[in-house]
Image (cartoon, rainbow, N blue to C red):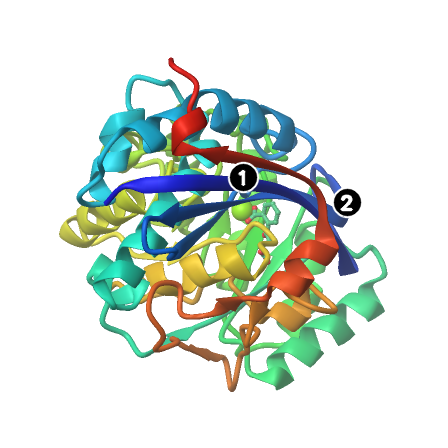
Amino acid sequence: MKIMEVNVRKLKMVLKHPFTTSFGTFQEKEFLVVEVKDEKGNSGWGESVAFHSPWYSEETVETNLHIIRDFLVPIVLENDIIHPEEVNGLFAHLRKNNMAKSAVEGAVWDLYAKREQVTLARALGGQLEKIEVGISIGINENMQELIETVRGFVEEGYKRIKVKIKPGFDVDVMRELRKQFPDVPMMADANSAYRIDDTELLKELDEFGLTMIEQPLASDDIIDHAKLQSQLKTPICLDESIHSLEDTRKAIELGSTKIINIKIGRVGGLTEAKKIHDYCLEKNIPVWCGGMLESGIGRAHNVALTTLPNFVLPGDTAGSSRYWEQDIILPEVTVEDGYITVPEGNGIGYEVDRQALERYTVDKWHFSNQEAPVQ
Ligand code: OSB
Ligand code: MG
C-alpha cells in the first residue's frame, strides 16, 4: 500500500473530571492524532498517548511532534508498506520514542484493515466479540467521596476497580474500600511512588486480597521489583517499566512481575503489543490493556487489541462518557454491564467525527508524498 498523505493534528480536550495520580493532576488533555491516506482516499487513524508533560514517561506531545514530523512521516511516505507488521522494522533504527512510533504505526494498521475490509481486531488475530472492562479511579483525599465514586462504578457493572495510591494515601484507604466492598475485584496503582525501603508498608496491602499492585517502584526498575515480589503475596503488575518484548522477557525471568499491563503506545505499537501478548500467553502470564485517558481513536485501538485471547483480566478502557463531554468518534465507546461490544465496521470500527475533530484541533500539519523531505 502506498501512503499518499499524512495529516497530524494537535488536539486539546477538557476532561469531564480531573484525574489525579501520584505524579500529578490532569484537567485537560493535549495529544496528537495521525491520519494516513492511501491512493483510494481511505483514512487510517492513530493517536499518540504522550501527555503534555513528561510525568508518566519521557515522551511529550512536543517530542512526539518532532519525531513524527521529522523522522516517521518521511519513512511511511517513502516506503511501500505491504503489511503493518513491517512498520516496526522501518522504525527500528530510531531509538525509543515509542508513543510517537505507535501513533503512526496504529494509523497504518487501521488503514490496512480498512483496505482489507476487516475489523482491526480481526486483522490482529483477535476473536472476542465483547471485552471485559474495569475502571481506574484517581486519588481523592476525601474518603467519603471516593467510596461513593467506587460505589457508582460498581453499580454500573465495571468488572474491577483500580484505585491510585501514593505514600500517605494507601493502606488505610485500601482497608476502608475493602471493608465497604468485600467482594469486588480491586487493585492499586502506585505509578512508581514507592522505593524498596517501603517493603514493610507494601506488605500490609497483602491482607486486602488485591488482584495486583501496579508499578509500585521506579519506572525504570525491574531489579527491586523482583526483590519486592519475593516478599509480597499480592502479584506485582508492571506498567511503566515495560517498553518491549525484551523488557517483558527480562522482567518475567527475574520474577519482577506476575501480570503485564500492555499499553500500545508505551511498547511502540500494535505489532510489539501483540508480540508481548503472545509471549505472555506462552509463559502463562495474564495480561490486560492499560489506558492513557485516550480519545475515541486510541480507545478503539485498545478495544481491538483486547480481543486477543490472553487479555484475561479487565482493562482500563472505560466508556467515552467517563472522560469526555463529546468524543471524536461515532458512535462513542459505550460500556454495558461491564462489557464493551467490539464494533463490526472495518478498521477501528468507529467513524472519526470530523466536526468534533476540527473543533478540538489547535494546530495541524499536512504532508504529502511529493513534498516528503529527503532524510
Ligand atoms: O498508570 O495506568 C496508568 C492515566 C494516566 C497515566 C497513567 C495511568 C492512567 C490510568 C487511567 O490509570 C487509565 C484510563 O482510564 O485511561
Ligand atoms: Mg499504571
Question: Which amino acid is tagged 2?
Answer: Thr
Ligand 2 within 8 Å of the CB at mark 1? no
Q: How crowded is mark 2: few (under 14 residues within 10 Å), some or many (20 or more)?
A: few
- Residue under the image location 33 percent in, 69 percent down: 346
Q: Position of residue 170 (x, y in %)?
A: 68, 50
Drawn side of residue 94 relative to residue 82, left or right: right
Give the total of numbered labels: 2
Instruction: Give 126 or 180, whichever is nearer the viewer.
Output: 126
Q: Earlier in the sequence, mark 1 or mark 2?
A: 2
Instruction: Give 342 or 318, whichever is nearer the viewer.
Output: 342
Q: In this view, does 153 lie above or below 240?
A: below
Quarter of the picture holding the N terminus: top left
Q: Position of residue 82 (x, y in %)?
A: 17, 43
Instruction: Give 105 or 357, whichever is nearer the viewer.
Output: 357
Quarter of the picture holding the C terminus: top left
Q: Is residue 113 above or below residue 248?
A: below
Q: What element carries label 1?
A: loop
Residue 362 visible in image: yes
Q: Where is residue 203 in the image (x, y as percent from the top left)?
A: 53, 45
- Residue carrying label 1: 216
- Residue under the image location 49 percent in, 20 percent down: 70
- Residue under the image location 51 percent in, 63 percent down: 317
